[in-house]
Image: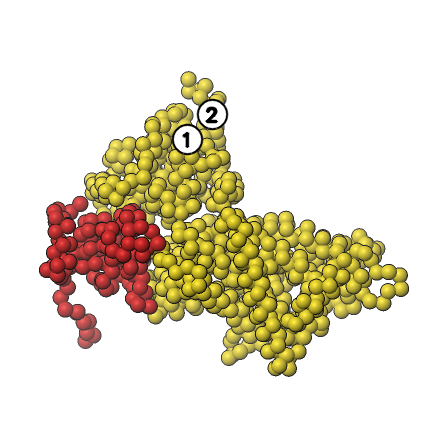
Chain colours: A yellow, B red
Amino acid sequence: MNIAVETFAPTARVALVGNPNSGKTALFNALTGSRQKVANYAGVTVERKEGQLKTAGGRTLSVLDLPGTYSLRARSPDEAVTRDAVLGRLAGEQTPDVLVCVADATNLRLVLRLILELKAVGRPMVLALNMYDIAQRQGLRIDLEGLERELGCPVITTVATRKRGIEALVAKVDEMARAGTLAGENQWREPSAGEIRQAHREAQRILKAHVRPPERPDTLTGRIDGVLLHPAAGLAILLALLFVMFQAVFTWATPAQDLINNAFQSLGALVARDLPPGLLTSFLTDGVISGVGSVLVFLPQILVLFLFIILLEDFGYMARAAFLMDRIMGGAGLHGRAFIPLLSSFACAIPGIMATRVIDNRRDRLTTILVAPLMTCSARIPVYTLIISAFIPNQTVAGFLSLQGLVMFSLYAAGILSALGISFLTRRLFWRGAVEPFLMELPTYKLPDPENVARNLFLRGKIFIERAGRIIFPLMIVIWFLSSFPGAPAGATDPAINYSIAGRLGQWLQPLLAPIGFNWQMTVALIPGFAAREVAVAALGTVYAIGNADAAPGTLATLLAQHWSIATGLSFLAWYVFAPQCASTLGVVKRETNSWIWPVVMLVYMTTLAYLASLIVYHAAVAFGLG
Amino acid sequence: MHDMLAQPIEAVAAAQAGIDPAVRRLSQARPGDVGVILDVRAETHPGDHGVGVEELQRRLLEFGFVEGAEIEVLHEGVIRHDPIAVRIDDMRVALRRRDAEDIWVRFVMRPPARRRRRS
């Protein structure tokens, strides 16, 4: 009979459920290694992480890492996914064969109540007591057999970061899958306040009977919090951290960037030397090589930024930052939880806007979504770097601060301040309702696990390169085409690009942007720049490289410094602080709000802001004699 | 959970009448205050939390703000001493004072502020 079951169901579906901060993702990584797929759940934009592994018995386990939750009573779209997946109600997903409830062994109280809820669902379940090494180090005694008896499900101890207990967990899941359907009837329904109290009492009783409190409880977290949550020192440290982060994005990434830059230049030179001059060579050097190079060169900066974000998240600092920022954000009409989506928006507004799902209230969420693209995303870094290196002298201020870094910092500050201002106005003008409750666990501090950090960093880098590959590279080819066809007529005196489609389009649109100091090459670059902000750099590169193929062989920055006035450069920077130059962001807003109104509102308000800011900056700079 | 909670409602009622000064709302606590949760209610400022007061009550309960839990106020924010960070049993939670109004706590009466003196 068993054999028949195995032939019919060689693959078992396993779902990981647990509180946030229980090390669920680390366990997921330990289970599935690099065999992971990141996508979205059908119809919603909650990130869906699935991985595969083979058990010793030859069965394939398909593991789903569900969003962390404290209860099945979903309060946000993420938690709704967890609830629906567990209950088998999620469109396009099959009911999991085995649930693995992941618990932080040092913090069992809340998860025990969740387990009691999960038991009512009636699926076969295993409890993974994760971070068991920390529990042992603290002298916490857990009566595993008693717990198994009490909960009616197997208990396995694991240390996901050290891969301990993983084999035992897999073997247990395999065994349960082999035993076939033991699933009972689903008796879960939304608990009332009285039922939650009752479940807490039950959890408390189980804890008292089977868990002896730690002999050496963790005091480190309390001592670190004494400094990091200190009213004055805490805020100072947060600001210092942000400042170091942005300086590091500049200084640490430079050597790697130079390396990539030189490699692509040598490659281009090599191709140009060995191939006869003509359309194909132009396509390879000006279209393909410089297009790919101008995107890849920013990978180091994006990795440095994500390294900071991932480290702070894993260390447990992000929740502290949200605590420190809550009132300050609240003053601008934002929810404390908006801090994390907005901070993610420094990397990219798209994951940031998707992360607003942790905010349950629709108005709070809409406000956060509307201002998220004002945070300086990593796609602006290429544009900022280019313009700053072209127009801001590389010198130090006050002995140790890089002037270029300082300008960068002020561009970030402009983004943050305008986001706060806009959300304040939105709250004041459009809705004056109450804000969501702010309840957040402050997790125990933990040293980030290098392997998990590396894996997450690799994942982010991969997503960036894929995006570059799928959106930016084809666009580079389109721009090259637009700027190469039709070719210059015989006996033409102007550069060939003046006669191309892009050149004509740019010249046609230029009067509109002339008041803010933009020339037609910039206008051309803005058109493909609507696909993604960093495209503008490659577009400028292509436009200028082709326009001056035989002249100035220097870098794009030197070229720009020759062609633009400082006022124009500054105006371009101001434009990029505000302009909605990212079709993907608008697409995500449409998807997240399920309406075309909000992307249109975003497009209009951001373009207006950008035009006004550039207008002011350009004319101020001209007045100071920088025109 | 604890036996001392035989009649929580009466205890809170007594506090509301101003009889027992040790029983206060969590929203009025200062860092360093220690106590035991007496009652988590659903009554103050309905419609002011963005969610119903019953929903807020259930969320508080799910986070471990249950009758009998030991609580200690650890930290508070800079602006208007808000939000607060508390230890409930063995976990740490941050919340805003306005959301903590319906949590009634019997605080341990502390001796007048001790001052550490260096000798």
**Horizontal side of residue B77 vs B8, given as left or right:** right
Q: Amino acid at mark 2?
A: Ala
Mark 2 → mark 1, Cα distance in angstroms: 10 Å
Q: Amino acid at mark 1?
A: Asp
Same chain, labels 2 and 1: yes
Which residue is painted at 49% across and 53% down in the image? A353
Quadrant where the C terminus of chain A sits is bottom right
Task: Using the image, determine if residue A239 lies above or below residue A581.
Answer: below
Using the rendered view, name the quadrant where residue A394 is placed.
bottom right
Q: At x 37% / y 49%, what residue is drawn?
A: A21
In this rendering, would A49 be left or right of A156?
Answer: right
* Residue at x-position 22% and y-position 51%: B40
- Depth order, front residue of A141/A393: A393
Image quadrant containing the N terminus of chain A = top left
Of helix, strand and loop, which one carries label 1?
Answer: loop
Residue located farthest toward the left when viewing the structure as drawn: B19
Q: Position of residue A291 (x, y in %)?
A: 69, 56
Where does residue A331 sit, x and y in percent of width and height? 38, 66
Which residue is at 26% across, 37% downward? A147
Which quadrant of the view contains residue A583?
Answer: bottom right
Of residue A515 and residue A43, the one placed in the foreground of this image is A515
B104 sits left or right of B92 in the view: left
- Disc 2 crowd rating (10 Å Cα; few below 14, some 14-19, many 20+) is some
Q: Nearer the viewer, residue A28 or B12?
A: B12
- Work out whether mark 2 precedes mark 1 in sequence or the reverse, and give the earlier one: 2
Which residue lies under the disc numbered 2? Answer: A9
- Residue B15 showing in the rendered view: yes
Residue A97's mark? 1
